[in-house]
Image: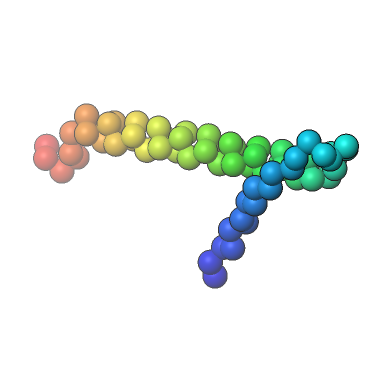
Amino acid sequence: MALKRDRISIEVIGPETERSDPTRADAALRSLARLIGRQIAREQFERKIALERRAQKKRPADGDA
């Protein structure tokens, strides 16, 4: 079953609004934090894979001895 991705909607709120809705602000911050966290995790994973590939290239094949 494929995961359904959340869509982020961008809404411009003009200066005529007197108060901002704290629940909307919290939701926006959580969405932003989730995106940043996913990007950090993706970068860490890519670094780990790159290190593993470099280590495999340096290691001689076991069956050649």
Residue 60, image x and y in percent? Answer: 18, 33
**Closer to us: 34 or 47:** 34
Nearer to me, 4 or 49: 4
Report the side of 21 relative to 4 (left or right).
Answer: right
The residue sitting at the left extreme is 64
Residue at screen point 47% across, 33% down: 44
Q: Where is residue 12? Give x, y as percent.
A: 69, 44
Hey, which residue is sitting farthest right in the picture? 18
Image label count: 0
Residue placed at 65% from the left, 39% from the top? Answer: 32
- What x and y, as percent, mark residue 20? 84, 39
Q: Quadrant of residue 55?
A: top left
Residue 54 picture quarter: top left
Residue 13, given in percent of the width and then of the height, sits at 74, 42
Q: Is residue 37 left or right of residue 22?
A: left
What residue appears at the point 53 percent right and 34 percent down from the top-left corner? 40
